[in-house]
Image: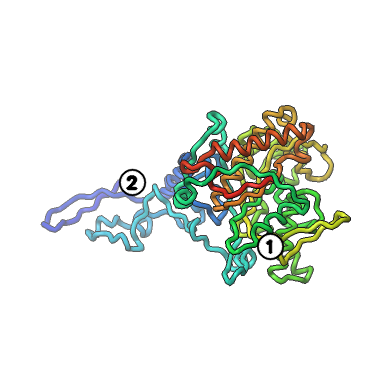
Amino acid sequence: MSDKYLVIIDAKGNKKKIKYFLINKANRKLLDIIDNYAKTHKPNKTITGGASATGERIGGTKGQNDKHSFNPSAHPFNPFGTSATAQSPAATNKPRSPKSPKSPKSPKSPKSPKSPKSPKVPKEIKDIIGQEHSGKKEYMTYTSYVYHDEYIEFKKYNEINIEIPALANLTKERRGKIIQNVELESNRNGMTNKGAILYNGSNPPKIGTIIAGNSGRPGGACGNFDGTLVNIHPNHKTQEEDIISNWFMTYMYNKNITEEEAKIYYGNKLFEYTIFNRWGLLFPYAKRTDIKNYYKTIQGINYRKAEAHDYATAWTIDDVYLSDKFYNKSGSSRYIHENQYKTTLVFVAGPNNNNPGTNGEINSVFRTYNKETDKNFHLFMNGVEAALFAGLIAMVYSKCNVALLVNVSGGLYRGTHDKDDYKHAYLNSLDNLLMNVQINGVELGSYFDAVYLL
């Protein structure tokens, strides 16, 4: 920067010497100051705001930034709203109007060109994630929730109160409600059958459907790493793949998409615009000899060495429609698209104790295997509890009042841990979370009218 002086005459005829500055392009740019501020600014630990349709993370301090990030493609910051060599507005002796488009911007609050509350979504994307129901347009929106630090705090005291101002009105509505415990539900036709039954009425509930996911691969065996879908059918034996297939087949039915080529196109696009590349392996095609990148994930976690709190993350899609399901005597099944329910899909990923070796080119299961949770049951269950912690809070954020749950990490991912020990500890963890986690001073269990474990 170089100092410059300008002589002006004020209203009384007095001469004044005013110091101002010019931007020296060769040495320093004010843009660097702003960029450095954006990078070094520490986020606030308090959880604030509401759910975002832009995919921004909500909650926690890890990966959370409450300020808008600076857009590197924007024009260089100009404190005068003019060219870099223009004189200061003070030299014009004219007051600045706050409504003027040339009003200077403060480097402490750089404005992002896109607001998370009103994202500009291209028409193609809106057409893909949009759907008509009951005469109104609804859009499937993605959000992620990170509660690593909050879970650490919870484990210290076995209780926590999380302040979420965006849910203040909901809190008033739910205050004084019964604190729900978990209800065990036996249903041979699965959780979507239960959801469809609950939804069939004049005042349907807002249902959250939890998905026991794969931290290395969104969509599990239905989602490819190139952004395409595969294995979409109603006869999956695993829960994640079954729900994914249900979601996409119901979508095709509701959109009246019948041609196979169109199903492939729209299915791949819906996958791309919602959960693809939102979490999972960062370098899926890395070789095992590439130790630096082989285990990296988009979440920034090496799950081979993950601690319990690292599993306190949830990824949600709002306004999804799932179909009822029916299993026949032969064991095959079909989706009943005429009977559907609206839900928020809540993906969580508990610890993986299943080590299948290194078969296959990518093998996301091997690359997320955690040897420590495989050896230590207590550590394993803490990781499972952390996933439930994030998942239940995410449901409240989406204003779900009924939770449909499954045994997270209770199948192949349980490894060699005893099944009965797992079930007992799982129920204890759920009831403990519903009783001892509070949002705005109200117990988590009071935000639900029912919590089912299928």
Residue 411, label in figure? none
Q: Residue at x 16, y 56 (%)?
A: 9
Is 294 drawn above or below residue 113 in the view shown? above
- Relative horizontal placement of residue 364, taking residue 318 as reference (left or right): right
- The image shows residue 55 at horizontal and vertical percentages of 57, 53
**Mark 2, other Cα within 10 Å: few <14 / some 14–19 / many ≥20:** few
Q: Residue at x 67, y 56 (%)?
A: 195
The quarter of the picture where residue 111 lies is bottom left
Q: Which mark is residue 340?
A: 1
Which image quarter: residue 329?
bottom right
According to the picture, the residue beneath numbered tag 2 turns out to be: 2
Amino acid at dot 2: Ser
1 or 2: tag closer to the N-terminus: 2
Q: Amino acid at mark 1?
A: Gln
Mark 2 element type: strand
The image shows residue 126 at horizontal and vertical percentages of 60, 66
Query: Is residue 272 visible to us here?
Result: yes
Q: Is residue 81 found left or right of 293 in the rendered image?
A: left
Distance between the Cα atoms at labels 1 and 2?
Answer: 68 Å
> Which one is nearer the viewer's eye here, 109 or 129?
129
Of 442 and 312, nearer the camera is 442
Q: Is residue 68 visible?
A: no
Q: Is 25 on the left or on the right of 406, as rendered?
A: left
Q: What residue do we see at 71% from left, 61% from top?
A: 323
Image coords of residue 397 (percent x, y): 54, 50
Mark 1, Cα crowd under 10 Å, few <14 / some 14-19 / many 20+, is: many
